[in-house]
Amino acid sequence: MASSIAAYSSVGTEPGTQSLLFALWKRGSYVLLPRLLPDGDLDWASFEGPESLVEGPHGILEPTEPSRGAGAVKAADVVIVPALAVDRRGRRLGQGGGSYDRALARVGPAILTVGVVFDEEFVDELPAFDHDIPVRAVVTPSGGFRRL
């Protein structure tokens, strides 16, 4: 029932988020999507429907709305992040650029952060580094939502 959700537009073999983004937007939620900055950090802008997206770096759809800044993610009630894998302690494996670790570092401890993966990508254990920020929940097709 969050009113403000920071999410992402799925690409390639990631679990699809397009229907989720549209459904959240249609129900009146404020949806923020990232734009990749040249330094690898994420800027955020509002999602105003499928027509408000254009292809950005790496073929990822990004919002065309005005920038809300890298710190806009702090105002979200829920932050949904991509992952190649998530383990039972919330450690996530990303693409290696650190973009989402930087974004998650800005999010307070009371904000729900959720990794979205396929069933086989929810694993017992992943390696972690000091800069890795764990997620607090995971969503999988067969297991649904699980707090970690």
Image (spheres, rainbow, N blue to C red):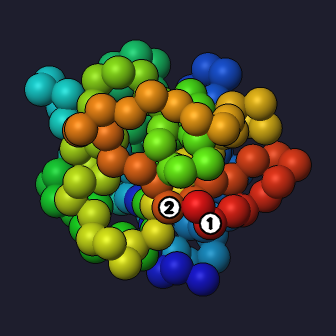
Looking at the rendering, in which quadrant would you find the C terminus?
bottom right
Query: The disc labelled 1 sits on which kind of residue?
Result: Arg
**Nearest to N terminus: mark 2 or mark 1:** 2
Residue 1 visible, this angle: yes
Name above or below for residue 41 compared with residue 106: above
Query: Which residue does the image show at 27% across and 71% down from the upper left?
Result: 108
Is residue 72 shown left or right of residue 112?
left
**Residue 87: x and y, percent?**
59, 41
**Residue 6: x and y, percent?**
42, 59
Residue 65 visible, this angle: no
Give the structural element (helix, strand or loop) at label 1: strand
Query: The disc labelled 2 sits on which kind of residue?
Result: Arg
Of residues 117 and 66, the one nearer the viewer is 117
Name above or below for residue 88 compared with residue 26: above
Residue 120 sits in quarter = top right
Name above or below for residue 76 compared with residue 92: below
Q: Residues within 10 Å of mark 1 (few under 14, many from 20)?
A: some
Is residue 76 shown left or right of residue 75?
right
Q: Which residue is mark 2?
A: 136
Query: Which residue does the image show at 31% across and 40% down from the upper left?
Result: 132
**Residue 9: x and y, percent?**
52, 40
The number of callouts visible is 2
Give the structural element (helix, strand or loop) at label 2: loop
Q: Which residue is mark 1?
A: 147
Query: Which residue does the image show at 45% across and 19% down from the upper left?
Result: 59
Query: Which residue does the image show at 50% across and 61% down from the upper left?
Result: 136
